[in-house]
Image (cartoon, grey):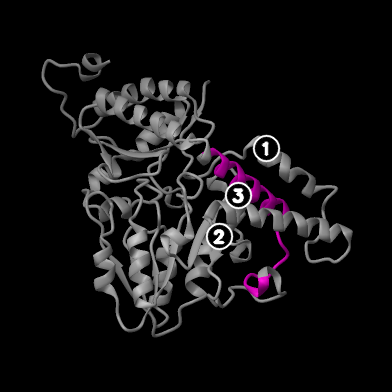
Amino acid sequence: MRRVYLDNNATTPVLPEVLDAMRPYFGERFGNASSIHHFGQDARAAVEQARESVAALLGAKASEVVFTSGGTEADNLAIAGLVSPGDHIISSRIEHHAVLNTCQHFEHSGCEVTYVPVDSRGWIDPEEVRRALRPNTKLISLMLANNETGVLQPLEEVGKIAAEADVYFHTDAVQAAGKVAVNVDAIGCDLLSISGHKIHGPQGAGALYVRKGTRLQPLFYGGRHERSRRAGTENVPGIVGLGKAAEVALHGLQRGEDRKLSAERDRLQAGLLDKIDEAGVNGAGGPRVPNTTSIYFDHVEGEAMVIAFDLKGLAVSTGAACSSGAIEPSHVLMAMGLTADRARASIRFSLGKQTTAEDVDFVLELVPQTVARLRDLSPSYHKPAGKDVLAARS
């Protein structure tokens, strides 16, 4: 059976060149990067080279990059490392649960949190952020690209607001880094999170950009690793893989690979909307990362579509992988004003570097057939009289 993977926002396959870069550090180059002998210093050099590569992807200084176990830890460190009881945090209703649940934890620990709304496109109005500021506001934490819709936020304006108010600004850039150009100075952020497995690197490796002068309390206590900001022996193979993935991503952006990916995404999206009635794009009208589209197919449950597509060889998702199996509709789509039924009828298609034109052709043939079949089984769907929708549009 042909299998096509369009769930790259959940995780991406490790690129061959990334795996090749990692492989020696599982065996002959096994040293602890904190050791002062040859084996340790060989590992240390590899870690610092990876730090340079990640910094280059973000337009940062290498000394401002802290390696973590992934995006969730980076988000937690950014928030928990700064706020204390009595502080006020500004976030949004569409954040990843790594941010939302951390904010909710601090709400129960004596902090106040304001969640700014989004419009029907999934956009945050920077003026809402300005209006939410209080004398005790310590941190603004807003994502750069949404993991479900791919919508990009106007964070440069938020960065200016944060600077004027002398408030720390963190952005979860896990779904943006490597897909669009990211520059921490242009954004104006003090902290920024990324994850290796979203950019064709390994799972279990991520990084937090921490602007020079930003003092964080660590989550872990132990040795003085990562300049005392993240204790624990470095995951050298994972860090090397993250560094190589960052290098590949940066070169890809410089070569215009994002434009090619966007063209395939747009072809997929337009083809599905042309062939399937009562369907539409969530987040249409706003800028998005080039690999992502979220489409609703009315009268069909998203989970049923995911299962049916998978049986035919296509891997997609209804939204965030960490929420897979959740009964509640997507909090992101509900915040955008979708009905619960439409939110549950939405599918996220996310392409990757390995996606081919033939993969898109396969999806354009499979999805309309499958949706039509599932709708025939749905009691809420009534096919227009005298019209075979699929046949008429194929």
Separation of marks 1 and 3 at Cα, in angstroms = 16 Å
Of the two numbered discs 1 and 3 on the same chain, state the one appearing first in sequence: 1
| Label 2: which secondary element | loop
Q: Is residue 127 left or right of residue 362?
A: left
* Towards the viewer: 17 or 77: 17
At label 2, counting other C-alpha atoms closer than 10 Å, the crowd grade (few under 14, some 14-19, many 20 or more) is: many
In the rendering, which numbered label is found on residue 186? none
Report the front residue among 53 and 305. Answer: 53
Three-letter amino acid code at the position of disc 1: Glu
Residue under the point 62% across and 37% down: 15
Task: Work out which quarter of the rendered image holds the C terminus and state it.
Answer: top left
Vertical placement of 16 versus 70: above or below?
A: above
Residue at 15% x, 16% y is 387
Which quadrant of the figure has residue 55? bottom right
The rendered magenta stretch, by its main secondary structure, is classed as helix
Q: Which residue is mark 3?
A: 203
Magenta stretch, residue numbers: 227-252
**Residue highlighted by disc 1:** 17
* Residue contact at pointers 3 and 2, CB within 8 angstroms: no
- Helix, strand or loop for disc 1: helix
Q: CA distance from mark 2 to mark 1?
A: 24 Å
Q: Is 382 one of the magenta-colored residues?
A: no
Q: Amino acid at mark 2?
A: Ala
